[in-house]
Image (spheres, grey):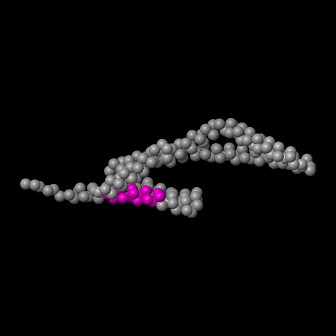
């Protein structure tokens, strides 16, 4: 009996983690959406900031180059042309990255809604709803598969193993809670009526 309460609390804690504003994927996605949209709106200012940073770095390099002597003027002109081409190329790359991330904002909105939906299912599952627990278990199974695929490509082998083990553990806790809910339902359904005379 204590295990059922403990597993129910674990399911409630996992759902709470999904809904807490400090450490959730939903919060991270929301913060990312705000940043990317802000960068897209202020793209001209971002370009100016990058140009100013590049000019400051070039000024530092020029001061360092003044201390050393250059034999020919053609080398200096060639370096200046390469620096301007590199700065324009860098600004174009950053603008493309901002554009791509801004295009992904609707996907982030959708993922945030899905995560919040299943977090609410987790709360219902922790309260004892079998259908919500079944749905939440399916979500956790999908997260195990998703984590296994993405962890391999995003982190090293050791990090991937730890991520998959942790997400699998969370799925096992939810599965145990579902099994306890089902066994409690069958126990109450098959309970016999005792008549005291």
* Most distant residue in the front direction: 67
Magenta-highlighted residues: 166-180
Position of residue 29 measured from the top left corner of the image (x, y, whole percent): 53, 45
Q: Is residue 31 above or below residue 7?
A: above
Along the line of sight, which residue is nearer the eye, 142 or 154? 154
On the image, the x and y values in percent for residue 67 come to: 86, 46
Disc tally is 0
Label the magenta part by its dominant secondary structure: helix
Residue placed at 54% from the left, 60% from the top? 160
Residue extending farthest left: 197
Q: Do we see residue 81 in this rendering? A: no
Q: Is residue 123 left or right of residue 38?
A: left
- Residue 99 image offset from top left, x and y in percent: 64, 44
Figure check: 80 above or below 158: above
Residue at left 47%, top 58%? 166
Among the 4 quarters of the image, the one containing residue 66? top right
The location of residue 80, given as percent across then percent down, is 83, 45
- Point out the image quarter for the N terminus: bottom left
Residue at x-position 38% and y-position 58%? 175
Residue 56 inside the magenta-drawn segment: no
Q: Is residue 69 visible?
A: yes
Left or right relative to 93: residue 192? left
Viewer-nearest residue: 11 or 30? 11
Question: For this view, does 195 lie left or right of residue 44?
Answer: left
Tell me the residue at 10%/55% (across/down). 196
Between 4 and 35, the residue placed more toward the observer is 4
- Position of the C terminus, as image quadrant, is bottom left
């Amino acid at each position: 009996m204590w295990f059922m309460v403990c597993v129910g609390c674990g399911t409630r804690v996992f759902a709470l983690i999904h809904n807490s504003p400090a450490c959730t994927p939903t919060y991270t996605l929301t913060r990312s959406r705000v940043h990317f949209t802000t960068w897209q709106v202020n793209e001209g200012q971002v370009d100016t900031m990058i140009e100013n940073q590049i000019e400051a770095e070039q000024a530092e390099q020029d001061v360092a180059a003044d201390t050393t002597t250059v034999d020919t003027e053609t080398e200096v002109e060639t370096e200046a042309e390469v620096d301007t081409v590199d700065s324009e190329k860098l600004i174009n790359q950053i603008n493309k990255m901002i554009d791509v991330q801004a295009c992904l904002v609707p996907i982030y909105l959708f993922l945030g809604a899905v995560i919040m939906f299943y977090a609410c299912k987790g709360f219902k599952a922790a309260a004892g709803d079998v259908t919500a627990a079944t749905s939440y278990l399916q979500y956790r199974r999908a997260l195990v598969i998703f984590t296994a695929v993405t962890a391999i490509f995003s982190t090293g082998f050791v990090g991937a193993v730890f991520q998959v083990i942790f997400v699998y553990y969370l799925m096992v806790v939810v599965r145990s809670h579902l099994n306890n809910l089902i066994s409690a339902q069958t126990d109450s359904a098959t309970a016999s009526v005792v008549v005291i005379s």
